[in-house]
Amino acid sequence: MSILVTGGAGYIGSHTCVELLDAGFEVIVVDNFSNSKSVVLNRIESITGKPLKLYAIDLLHREALEGVFEVNAIEAVIHLAGLKAVGESVDNPLWYYKNNITGTLNLLEIMNKYKVNKMVFSSSATVYGASSSVPNSEDSPLKANNPYGRSKLMIEEILGDLYRSNPDWYISILRYFNPVGAHESGRIGEDPHGIPNNLMPHISRVAVGRSDRLSIFGSDYDTPDGTGVRDYIHVVDLAKGHLKALEKINRVSGINYYNLGTGRGHSVLEVIKMFESVTGRNIPYSLTNRRPGDIDKCYADPTKAKVELDWVARKTLSDMCRDAWRWQKNNPNGYEG
Ligand code: UFG
């Protein structure tokens, strides 16, 4: 029996595949490579010494996707495929809804048909919205304020309705906080197209000389040093969380929601200082205006994942900076190099 990982060539998907293969699972990846490169799969195989099966398929191509279920015995699906840039989703909402929602509906209908009823879904802390107080627990109010976030929230609701219609589903919804860092081999990591939207890849690119300086978006937030506070979580800890969720859905039916975060917030300035001290690189920065849609602080209450999944994030901010830098230094041009 195999685990199907949609979006398995992406940043979180590639790290999750490594953990799955290391744990002895057979892995099938479905990816359309819209935001990833096929060379990632070779690197996963060389890190783990194990093969995986790849289908270069878009979830919108229903027949092709159904073909994967026809010829493979799939036990569970880890569903990570989706578009994820907030700004892009504001500019092109229909594209986001079609990809994220229709792609998920195709997948769920096919799963229903082939009686595969176990899913781990990649959601986001973005579903807690701007107004909820920190730390966010799983029962904090939900509200997304952009099409990307709303697509995650809508899929959570679709999965809830599906479970209520058929309690024989086993569903785990993982709400990620801010994944950063890279596998400690330095062979797989985050490789965004163009100028990175997110903080850590931008810092790494300044460090490696691909960007001149970092803009800090806002220095007048209600936080100790005025810059935004987030719950950064090492991508390998996050990947391990998927295995714990998989173990749980193999035992118990139901739908469950888990925060995957460390429970600690760090400001932008703290991240920069830690990166500089761990790597010895200087990160020039400018203080600029707030980025529209950003909130002052966001961090998890991760208690539920600890109690119910026996999962805790173990890696520190220093580990995250060290591993992000190792990846960037070894691969200055990302997977292109
Ligand atoms: N930031 C900068 N400069 C940059 C990039 C980011 O100062 O060049 C700041 C942001 O203003 C924020 C912090 O760094 O204070 C973190 O920003 P990221 O873009 O790295 O992460 P976000 O918290 O904004 O977004 C992340 C995910 C989204 C998700 C969101 C909410 O990238 O997909 O968390 O959970 F929706």
Image (spheres, rainbow, N blue to C red):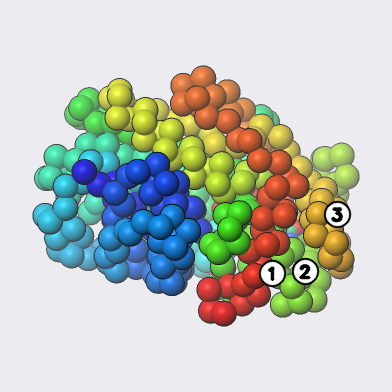
> Label 3 belongs to which residue?
277
Identified at 66% across, 32% down, the residue is 263
Identified at 23% across, 54% down, the residue is 106
**Is 110 on the left-hand or right-hand side of 148?**
left
The 10 Å Cα crowd at callout 3, few under 14, some 14 to 19, many 20 or more, is some
Spatial distance from mark 1 to mark 2, Cα to Cα? 9 Å
The x, y position of residue 96, in whole percent, is: 41, 61
Label 1 vs 2, first from the N-terminus = 2
Q: In the structure shown, which secondary structural element does the residue marked by tag 2 occupy? A: helix
Question: Against 95, is 19 above or below?
Answer: above
Spatial distance from mark 1 to mark 3, Cα to Cα? 16 Å
| Tag 1 and tag 2, C-beta contact below 8 Å | yes
The x, y position of residue 305, in whole percent, is: 51, 27
Based on the displayed image, in which of its 4 quarters is residue 170 positioned? top left
Quadrant hosting ligand 1 = bottom right
| Front disc: 1 or 2 | 1
Quadrant (top left, top right, bottom left, bottom right) of the C terminus:
bottom right
Residue situated in front as seen by the camera: 233 or 103: 233
Q: In the structure shown, which secondary structural element does the residue marked by tag 3 occupy? A: helix
**Is 209 on the left-hand or right-hand side of 258?**
right
Question: Against 327, is 234 above or below?
Answer: above
Name the residue type under label 1.
Lys
> Label 1 belongs to which residue?
329
Name the residue type under label 3.
Ser
The 10 Å Cα crowd at callout 2, few under 14, some 14 to 19, many 20 or more, is many
> Label 2 belongs to which residue?
207
Label 1 vs 3, first from the N-terminus = 3
Identified at 24% across, 31% down, the residue is 169
